[in-house]
């Protein structure tokens, strides 16, 4: 029965006749974890579980001497030896499939709050709003890190453990694959009839010729072959194919690791920045000019590429009729840029989906809005303010926008205005609203204040919000201005003129050196995935036994996790081809020539 | 770029979709008829198993047949039953249902294509179009699976689900044909959303099969415990739990790489449009959750004690997260992905 | 004979490699989370222990690149012409709250050192000339300021010392090198200390 126990050192292995459901979900490290009895204990392909992918039944122990090939039932689970170290136990637990499964669940579960609660990284204003609207709950959620889930230590722990488990499984399997790729297929079992697929037929060829032709045919199909040793009087050939499956599986998992590393590289060496630019303005890529700068951990401001951009103009087009009236049709920011000071300026049309690439950086058009221009004269008649002031759209459909004008250098007291700008003014029940996002009838409504803006104290303030705690309102109700109109504040406090409006764009500048590696690893992962799903590991055995008229040829086949189906067809086709080859070989023989048709 | 909507094509699309819905409904009735009244047959996906047939005649191997008769005792793999033959054997109810389904699928495809022609772009720019397209893919893919594996009895369930989904889309989510917002005006629309649509259609089929598996498995458990009558004719007509399990698995491994590719394509597009390839936007996060859950299903199938019912529950959780992503997250949670077009 | 996981030599090697790989992953993760921290970098001292007020030792002073522009009054100005005097270069904006809180300090110190061979130059970021002039008049600032709406001057100077958001004040010695920098609001005592140290030409101590 030694053939049935054919096992090599690297691949403890034996054919299991009659088993169509390849078994053994033995986890990567131990048999002891597997469920008892109902699970089959050994299989021909111990590396793969029935799922095929990442099943980790690595070190299946060599079969017991009292193993009965007719009994597919399980061996009792192996009891761990007495001197089991805790470290080893922990290692085995970590690299077991069950742990991987639990960690995958935790990963999915942990991501859910990151999508439902506002996140610090994406929308800090929404997080603030959440704190104000849920004053009791929010601090607790904050303690748990739920406002920054994907940067939280517990989330990192989940995926780091998952990757540790992955690496701990994948690396030994890579070695095993390398070893298995070097070892020849097992010897052909004596009784091929017990394999899941088998066929037998008669051939007029002698046994050794039949096997030689079969070997040639199989070799031509790129099977790896094993022939009997010198002096062995039996006639058989073993063929095996399909190592790419495991290779694809390993490639997939390693590529995922590569994605993680690429993300880390981007996080360390990359940066993101934001800049709001008004039409006609320009900016140089330096920290003091950026509205927001989020460097990676190893990035300093001196790593910024020294380019500069001028915004020549911005146009937003909207559909003016039909069901999509008011929907934007296109955005176009006409810029000119130079990659370093003194370099010639080049023009570019910056649009969404059409970023600017300069110096391995990318500049994106993110948003836009209106910046109404105001001139303010104070009590003494001096012009103390003259600027286009960006207003933030409250309604991205109609572009009704909110903003604030701060005049800190007005005398005798500082002045402030809270305003609402509408590109197409319309009065709805006495309330000013915008009917259309394009500036067809622009107007601004303002409320005036005087007092202490709080800006001289040195504590930074938002330029979009006015703190009126130390101010008094000077106008009883808001006043409406159209372009060119002015309003004189009561009591001779000064005058504000709405001189016109410009548009602003917000740009995102990103540098991510891990981007291309992440893409490459993603594509490799996909390739590995496809390989592991499409390729089957299969073995085919051919035996020939001499008879009076030639030989009886038996062909047996076994496919591991024939998940995609199709081995049945492949086997049938193989048998037909072998038979044809044998018959042809038969007809070439001298005794048969006269019977050729 | 201002693109005008071709109203002729738009209305043709609407008409063909209603037609498809009607024809599908009739097909479901025919499948149900086969289920209830059709010719009794083994509930087997016959190409799954190898048949061993002992044959006495030569089976077309070698030159002419004038060699000596092979002695008794040869065994060769059976020639598979051809598709037309199998359909012929399946009975008239199945033939009617298949014909109607195919007709409905053609009408459905025409509806999708004319919608695309109407708006001058790939016809999956909002929720309605997305559901219309994915049900079309689900129907065509399922028809292929059903014919390949001769799984006629699954027809009533999967096509029924298609009818339901399409009906919901028509009544609740309908959006008139219109142009895309600038952020969606990119050739990546064709790549990313196409892949997601394809994958969703495939996972849709897998989900229906998974539900069927749970039903059959529970029935089998109850029979084993003596609580149910093993002779229950209706349930015996569905493929066995094991076959459903295999079929589901093959469907999922078809859909999973497509989903993976869709996520990667989405990341590339996000980088072009928004300046970063992954930002944990709610829709991105839920696409990730879906991916992780399907990966968990694949791992569960290889883990002791997790195969079978538990694995299928995981797979259904994955589909649930996909549907949540589509119907809840995209619509109700603000993020950069809110282009569902549903108001 | 049942085999165990790590009793064979090959098995041990594999376990070792696997453990090393896992350790590498965890180490990479740890490094990623680690902060680069440390004490005072070489060649720098803090005034009163404040890391925002840095004095640079001679030999560790960066050369400020030359820049030029037109002041708010319409007069052309070039940094190189100030070589031989101590220059206080202040980046500011009328909209910037911390800049406003140091306005009086700057006015006072510029007046005090007006005839002592110390020149104050302002670089106005992100402002219109009208707003900038209103600020200067409000605080009584008499020294010239360049309007730098595109931050090109800040970009150029950042090659010497990184200029982040205003207010940032550089004290440049007679040879055109940065002797001290204040990142944030400049207080009277700190700026005064820096100016006198730059004037004496002694290394920061």
Image (cartoon, rainbow, N blue to C red):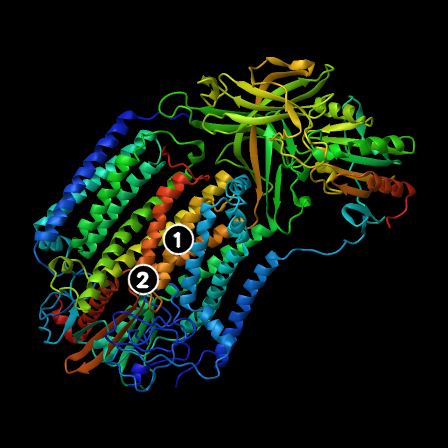
Choose top left, top right, bottom left or bottom right for residue B50.
Answer: bottom left
Query: From the viewer's perspective, is C100 left or right of B223?
Result: right
Q: Pointer 2 and pointer 1: residues touching (CB < 8 Å)?
A: no
Disc assigned to residue B51: none
In percent of width and height, residue B170 lies at 26, 36
From the viewer's perspective, is B162 left or right of A531?
A: left
Q: Dividing the image into 4 quarters, which one contains the N terminus of chain A?
A: bottom left
Q: Is residue A153 visible?
A: yes
> In the rendered image, which residue does mark 2 sit on?
B310
Q: Relative to A318, does residue A491 appear above or below in the rendering?
A: above
Among numbered discs 2 and 1, the one appearing first in the sequence: 1
How many residues crowd mark 1 within 10 Å: few (<14), some (14–19), many (20+)?
many
The answer to whether A321 is drawn above or below residue C151 in the figure is above
- Mark 2, residues whose alpha carbon is within 10 Å: few (<14), some, or many (≥20)? some
Q: Position of residue A205 (x, y in %)?
A: 20, 76
Q: Secondary structure at mark 2?
A: helix
Query: In which chain is the residue bearing label 2?
Result: B
- Residue at 45%, 52% in the rendered image: A111
Query: Percent position (x, y) of residue A352?
Result: 49, 34
Q: Residue beneath label 1, please? A: B291
Percent position (x, y) of residue A213? 26, 72
Horizontal side of residue A348 vs A44, given as left or right: right
On whether disc 2 and disc 1 are found on a single subunit, the reply is yes
In-front residue for pair C99/B241: C99
Q: Secondary structure at mark 1?
A: helix
Asked if A236 appears above or below A335 in the picture, the reply is: below
Task: Measure the alpha-carbon separation of dots 2 and 1.
Answer: 17 Å
Q: Is residue B327 left or right of residue C49?
A: left
Give the foreground label among 2 and 1: 2
């Amino acid at each position: 029965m030694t053939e049935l126990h054919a096992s090599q050192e690297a691949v403890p292995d034996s054919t299991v006749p009659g088993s169509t459901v390849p078994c053994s979900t033995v986890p990567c490290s131990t048999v002891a974890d597997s469920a008892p009895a109902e699970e089959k204990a050994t299989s021909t392909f111990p590396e793969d579980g029935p799922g095929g992918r990442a099943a980790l039944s690595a070190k299946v122990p060599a079969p017991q001497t009292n193993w009965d090939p007719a009994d597919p039932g399980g061996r009792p689970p192996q009891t761990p030896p007495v001197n089991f170290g805790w470290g080893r136990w922990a290692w085995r637990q970590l690299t077991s499939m069950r742990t991987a499964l639990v960690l995958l669940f935790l990963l999915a579960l942990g991501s859910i709050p990151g999508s439902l609660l506002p996140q610090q990284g994406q929308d800090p204003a929404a997080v603030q709003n959440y704190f104000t609207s849920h004053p009791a709950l929010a601090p607790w959620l904050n303690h748990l890190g739920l406002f920054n889930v994907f940067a939280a230590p517990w989330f990192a722990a989940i995926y780091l453990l998952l990757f540790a488990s992955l690496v701990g499984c994948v690396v030994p399997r890579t070695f095993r694959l390398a070893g298995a790729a070097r070892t020849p297929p097992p010897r052909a079992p004596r009784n091929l009839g017990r394999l899941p697929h088998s066929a037998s037929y008669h051939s007029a060829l002698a046994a050794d010729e039949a096997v030689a032709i079969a070997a040639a045919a199989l070799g031509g199909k790129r099977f790896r072959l094993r022939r009997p040793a010198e002096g062995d009087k039996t006639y058989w050939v073993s063929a095996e194919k399909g190592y790419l499956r495991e290779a694809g599986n390993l490639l997939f998992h390693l590529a995922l690791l590569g994605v993680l590393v690429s993300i880390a590289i981007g996080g360390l060496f990359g940066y993101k920045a934001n800049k709001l630019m008004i039409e006609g303005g320009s900016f140089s890529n330096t920290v003091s000019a950026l509205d927001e700068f989020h460097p990676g951990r190893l990035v300093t401001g001196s790593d910024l590429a020294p380019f500069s951009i001028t915004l020549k103009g911005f146009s937003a087009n909207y559909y003016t009729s039909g069901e999509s009236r008011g929907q934007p049709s296109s955005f176009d920011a006409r810029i000119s840029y130079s990659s370093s000071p003194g370099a010639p300026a080049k023009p570019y049309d910056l649009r969404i989906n059409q970023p600017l690439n300069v110096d391995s950086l990318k500049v994106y058009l993110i948003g836009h809005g209106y910046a109404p221009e105001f001139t303010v004269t104070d009590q003494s008649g001096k012009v103390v303010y003259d600027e286009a002031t960006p207003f933030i759209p409250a309604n991205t459909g109609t572009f009704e926008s909110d903003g604030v004008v701060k005049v800190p250098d007005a005398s005798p007291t500082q002045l402030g205005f809270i305003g609402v700008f509408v590109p197409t003014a319309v009065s709805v029940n006495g309330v000013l609203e915008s009917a259309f996002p394009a500036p067809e009838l622009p107007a601004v409504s303002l409320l005036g204040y005087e007092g202490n803006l709080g800006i001289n104290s040195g504590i930074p303030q938002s330029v979009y919000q006015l703190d009126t705690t130390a101010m008094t309102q000077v106008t009883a109700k808001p006043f409406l201005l159209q372009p060119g109109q002015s309003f004189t504040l009561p009591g001779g406090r000064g005058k504000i003129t709405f001189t016109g409006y410009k548009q602003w764009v917000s740009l995102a500048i990103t540098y991510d050196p891990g981007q291309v590696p992440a893409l490459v690893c993603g594509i490799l992962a996909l390739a590995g995935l496809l390989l592991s799903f499409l390729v089957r590991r299969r073995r085919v055995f051919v035996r020939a036994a001499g008879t009076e008229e030639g030989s009886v040829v038996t062909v047996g086949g076994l496919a591991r996790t024939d998940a995609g189906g199709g081995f049945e067809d492949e086997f049938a086709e193989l048998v037909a081809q072998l038979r044809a080859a044998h018959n042809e070989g038969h007809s070439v023989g001298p005794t048969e020539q006269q019977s050729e048709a | 770029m201002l693109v005008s909507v071709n109203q002729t094509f738009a209305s043709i699309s609407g008409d063909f979709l209603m037609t498809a819905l009607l024809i599908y409904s009739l097909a479901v009735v025919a499948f149900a008829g086969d289920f209830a009244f059709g010719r009794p047959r083994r509930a087997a996906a016959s190409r799954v198993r190898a048949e061993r047939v002992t044959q006495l005649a030569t089976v077309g191997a070698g030159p002419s047949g004038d060699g000596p008769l092979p002695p008794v005792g040869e065994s060769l793999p059976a020639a598979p039953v051809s598709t037309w033959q199998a359909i012929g054997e399946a009975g008239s109810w199945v033939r009617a249902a298949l014909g109607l389904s195919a007709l409905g699928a053609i009408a459905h495809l025409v509806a999708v294509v004319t919608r695309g022609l109407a708006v001058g772009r790939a016809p999956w720019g909002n929720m309605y179009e997305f559901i219309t397209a994915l049900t079309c893919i689900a129907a065509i893919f399922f028809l292929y699976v059903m014919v390949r594996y001769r799984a006629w009895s699954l027809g009533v369930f999967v096509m029924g689900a298609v009818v339901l989904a399409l009906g919901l889309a028509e009544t609740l989510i309908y959006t008139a044909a219109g142009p895309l917002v600038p952020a969606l005006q990119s050739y990546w629309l064709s790549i990313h959303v196409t892949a997601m649509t394809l994958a969703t259609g495939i996972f849709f089929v897998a989900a229906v099969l998974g539900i069927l598996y749970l039903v059959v498995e529970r029935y089998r458990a109850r029979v084993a415990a003596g609580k149910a009558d093993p002779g229950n004719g209706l349930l015996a007509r569905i493929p066995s739990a094991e076959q459903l399990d295999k079929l589901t698995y093959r469907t999922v491994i078809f859909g999973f790489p497509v989903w993976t590719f869709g996520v990667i394509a989405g990341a590339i597009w996000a980088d072009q449009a928004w300046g970063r390839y992954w930002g944990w936007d709610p829709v991105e996060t839920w696409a990730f959750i879906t991916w992780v859950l399907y990966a968990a299903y694949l791992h569960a199938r290889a883990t002791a004690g997790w195969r079978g019912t538990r694995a299928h529950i995981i797979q259904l959780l994955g589909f649930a997260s996909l549907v949540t992503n589509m119907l809840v997250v995209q619509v109700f949670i603000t993020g950069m992905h809110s282009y569902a077009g549903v108001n | 004979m049942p085999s165990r996981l790590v009793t064979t030599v090959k098995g041990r090697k594999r376990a070792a490699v696997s453990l090393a790989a896992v350790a590498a992953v965890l180490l990479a993760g740890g490094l990623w989370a680690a902060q680069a921290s440390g004490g005072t970098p070489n060649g720098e001292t803090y005034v009163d222990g404040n890391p925002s007020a840095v004095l640079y030792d001679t030999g560790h002073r960066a050369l400020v690149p030359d820049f030029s522009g037109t002041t708010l009054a319409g007069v052309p100005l070039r940094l190189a012409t100030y070589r031989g005097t101590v220059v206080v270069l202040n980046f500011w904006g009328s909209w910037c709250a911390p800049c406003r809180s140091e306005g009086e300090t700057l006015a006072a110190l510029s007046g005090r050192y007006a005839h002592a061979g110390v020149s104050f130059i302002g670089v106005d970021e992100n402002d219109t000339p009208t707003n900038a002039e209103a600020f200067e008049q409000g605080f009584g600032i008499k020294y010239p300021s360049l309007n730098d709406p595109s931050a090109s001057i800040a970009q150029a100077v950042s090659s010497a010392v990184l200029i982040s958001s205003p207010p940032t004040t550089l004290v440049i010695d007679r040879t055109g090198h940065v002797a001290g920098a204040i990142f944030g609001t400049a207080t009277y005592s700190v700026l005064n200390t820096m100016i006198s140290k730059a004037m004496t030409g002694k290394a920061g101590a």
